[in-house]
Image (tube, rainbow, N blue to C red):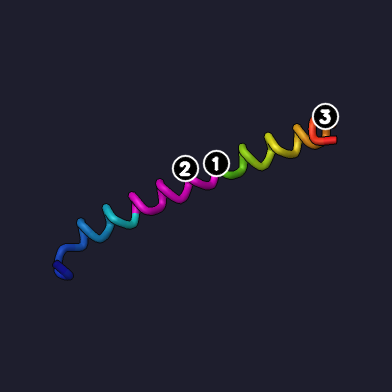
Amino acid sequence: MLGEPSITYARVALARRLAEIVYHIWRDEIDYFAILRRSGVWG
């Protein structure tokens, strides 16, 4: 298992892509809440 660099590389690439997707979703949600707050929906 440790002797197969291609599998390790694929795992790293997959983890990096997942982190990227989560980051984009999280950032979009933060922006959404900031817009809501700025527009006065939450008082």
Residue 15 placement, left or right of 23: left
Q: Quadrant of residue 3?
A: bottom left
In the rendered structure, which amino acid carries the disc numbered 2?
Ile
Q: CA distance from mark 2 to mark 1?
A: 5 Å
Q: Circle 1 sits on which residue?
A: 24
Q: Circle 3 sits on which residue?
A: 39
Q: CA distance from mark 3 to mark 1?
A: 22 Å
Check disc 2: other Cα within 10 Å, few if <14, some if 14-19, many if 20+: few
Check disc 1: other Cα within 10 Å, few if <14, some if 14-19, many if 20+: few
Q: Circle 2 sits on which residue?
A: 21
Mark 3 vs 2, N-terminal side: 2
Q: CA distance from mark 3 to mark 2?
A: 27 Å
Q: Secondary structure at mark 1?
A: helix
Q: Position of residue 42 (x, y in %)?
A: 80, 35
Magenta-drawn stretch, dominant element (helix, strand or loop): helix
Mark 3 vs 1, N-terminal side: 1
Residue 16 placement, left or right of 11: right
Tell me where the magenta segment starts and ends, as one range.
13-23
Total marks in image: 3
Which quadrant is home to the N terminus? bottom left
Residue 18 in magenta stretch: yes
Check disc 3: other Cα within 10 Å, few if <14, some if 14-19, many if 20+: few
